[in-house]
Amino acid sequence: MSRAFVDESASESREGDSPELRKPLPPGAKNYVTPEGAARTRSELAALLAAPQPRLREVERRIQYLSRMVAIMETVVPSARPPERVVFGSTVTVDENGGGRRTYRIVGVDESDPAAGHVSWISPIARALTGRRVGDSVVVSLPSQQLTLTVIAIG
């Protein structure tokens, strides 16, 4: 094939520097994590660093990402007694739209697992619930729907 039909910029970008990794946090925000999340992140980073060489590009990028997140990590240790208001690390049981109960735990961005009810502290649901007390209601606008959440319990 003629070199006229080869996209040299595509091959250069694959072999050259990768684009900068973006942190999934607002600019200047700390990487708040639960003690369990901090332990998992440090453990994953240590395992990747201990892996034999050579590493794949994806592994190197993951190491770079985890190193950056660990550098700005701030572990938030929960209080010994349940809080009166929803805070980072809280487990919150809510009534959704007046018809069903759902439990959320407010966690760090790398700990989020919506299917398990773990929502990032920067998510719309966590932002809406933070600072609320038992009995408070809040309306959360999500891309697919609007939810009315009433706080039933905080743990």
Image: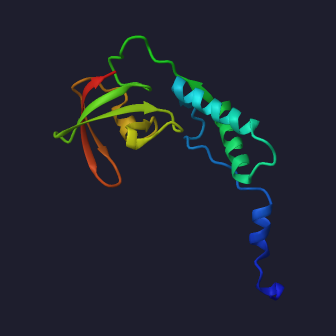
Locate the C terminus and report the quarter of the image it occupies.
top left
* Relative horizontal placement of residue 99, taking residue 106 as reference (left or right): left
Q: Residue at x 61, y 33 (%)?
A: 41
Q: Is residue 147 above or below residue 105?
A: below
Q: Position of residue 37 (x, y in %)?
A: 54, 30
Query: Quarter of the image holding residue 140?
Result: top left
Q: Position of residue 58 (x, y in %)?
A: 69, 52
Work out which residue is located at the far left of the displayed protein and give it. Answer: 99
Q: Residue at x 76, y 64 (%)?
A: 13
Looking at the image, can residue 72 be seen? Answer: no
* Relative horizontal placement of residue 114, taking residue 58 as reference (left or right): left
Locate the N terminus and report the quarter of the image it occupies.
bottom right
Q: Position of residue 90 (x, y in %)?
A: 39, 25
Q: Residue at x 71, y 42 (%)?
A: 64
Considering depth in this image, is 138 or 117 the residue closer to the camera? 117
* Relative horizontal placement of residue 99, taking residue 40 as reference (left or right): left
Work out which residue is located at the far front of the displayed protein and give it. Answer: 52
Q: Residue at x 59, y 40 (%)?
A: 27
Work out which residue is located at the far bottom of the displayed protein and give it. Answer: 2
Question: Tell me, what colour scheme is on the image?
Answer: rainbow
